[in-house]
Amino acid sequence: MTNTPHGYRYEPVLTVPAAGPHPPHLVARSRELLRATLGMMAEFGLGSDAGRRAFDTYPVHAERAIRAAAEVGVSPVELLAANLCYDVLMGAGAMGCSTLALAGTDGPTLARNMDWFPAEKVAKASCLVVEDYGTSAGFVGMIGAVTGLSRRGFCVCLNAVFGTSDPAGYPVLLFLRHVLDTATDFSHALELVRTERLMTCGIVTLVGTHNGERAVVERSPTRALVRAATDDSPLAATNHFRALAQPGECSRYDHLKRHAGRTPALEVLTHPAVLQSITAQHVELHPATGRAAMHVPSHLLPDDVRDEVTLADLMGFVG
C-alpha cells in the first residue's frame, strides 16, 4: 500500500493469465461489475439488442465472448453488450479519466487514471491480464480494451468525451482491442486509430518506445486530429477536445499541464486536484521495457464499501 502526502492510499493488483485459471474472488467481482454495467445500460433501454448486433458483426470478438462467458457466469451476448458500455453510456454524463504521455530517459511512459461508474466494482475487479498481444489493464473476462500494452512496442488508452455517434461504426472498446491485436508497431497503431470509423467519439492516447512516439488522437466517428509530441514536453488528455473542437475548461487538465514532467506521474495523478469520486484505477505502461503496473484506491476495496449507481447518478455527474 502507498500513502500520499494528502492522505490518499492505493495498492497494486494481481496479474493473471487471460486463459486462467483465475482466482474465484476475481471472477466473482468481474461478474458483479458486468451485472452492474448491464443494469445501467438497461436503464437506457439498451443491452441485449446491442450485444446481439455486435455478436453478429464482429466474429473474432464473439468467439472470445463464447470462451469467457461461461467462467464469468453471463451469456456471450451479455458479455459483448457490457463491452459496449462506453458507446451506450456516453450520453449519461459519466465523464472521467486523466492521462499523461511522458518522455523519459529510457523511453516514454503512459500514465493514467481510469475514472468510471461504478468505481467500487471497477476497483475490486481490476487486474492486469496477460493476453496474447501483451497486457490489459482490465478485468477477468473483458473482451474489449480501455488501457493496454502491446508486445510490439506501443500502448493505448481511452478517455471519454462527449460528441456524436454512428451506430454503424466500430464500438470503441472492441476497436482498441483490435488495434492491440493487429497493429505491428506504434505507427501502424496510430494509423488505425486515425482512420477507423467509430461508433462514438473518444480521445485515444498512444505511446511507443521512443519519446517522439507519443500522440493524443481526438476522434469523432469519422474525423481525427492528432496532437503529437514535438519535443520532450508532456502530452495530457482529460475529457475535452483541444484540437477537434474549442477546448472546454478542465481544472484537472490545467493541473496536469502545470506539474507533469516535474513531478512523478503517480504523484500528479493522485493529487486531490486530479482525483475524482469515480477514480478506480491508476495505470503506468512503459512500452520500451514492457513494464505494466496498475494500482487501485484502497478506500474502495473493503467488503462493506458498496457503490450502487442509479440513473440519476449518471445524469448528474460530469467530470
Image: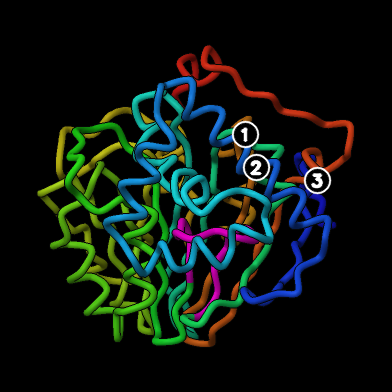
Q: What residue is disc 2 on? A: 33
In the depicted structure, whether residue 220 falls above or below residue 215? above
- Residue 224 at x, y = what percent? 14, 53
- Give left or right: position of 88 versus 274: left
Q: Confirm or deny contact between disc 2 and disc 1 (CB under 8 A).
A: yes
C-alpha span from label 3 to label 1: 21 Å
Which amino acid type is marked by label 2?
Leu
Q: Which residue is mark 1?
A: 36
**Residue 274 or residue 29, whichever sits in front:** 29
Name the amino acid type tagged 3.
Answer: Ser
Residue 85 falls in which quadrant of the image?
top left
Whichever of callouts 3 and 1 sits on the residue coming sooner in the sequence is 1
Foreground: disc 3 or disc 2? 2
Label 2: few (<14), some (14–19) or many (≥20) C-alpha neighbours in 10 Å: many
State how far apart marks 2 and 1 are (Cα).
5 Å
- Evaluate whether residue 283 shows in this view: no
Which tag, 3 or 2, sits closer to the chain's start? 2
What segment is highlighted magenta in the picture? 134-148
Residue 316 or residue 69, whichever sits in front: 69
Location of residue 11 by image quarter: bottom right
* Magenta-colored stretch includes residue 138: yes
Residue to which mark 3 is pinned: 298
Quadrant housing the N terminus = bottom right
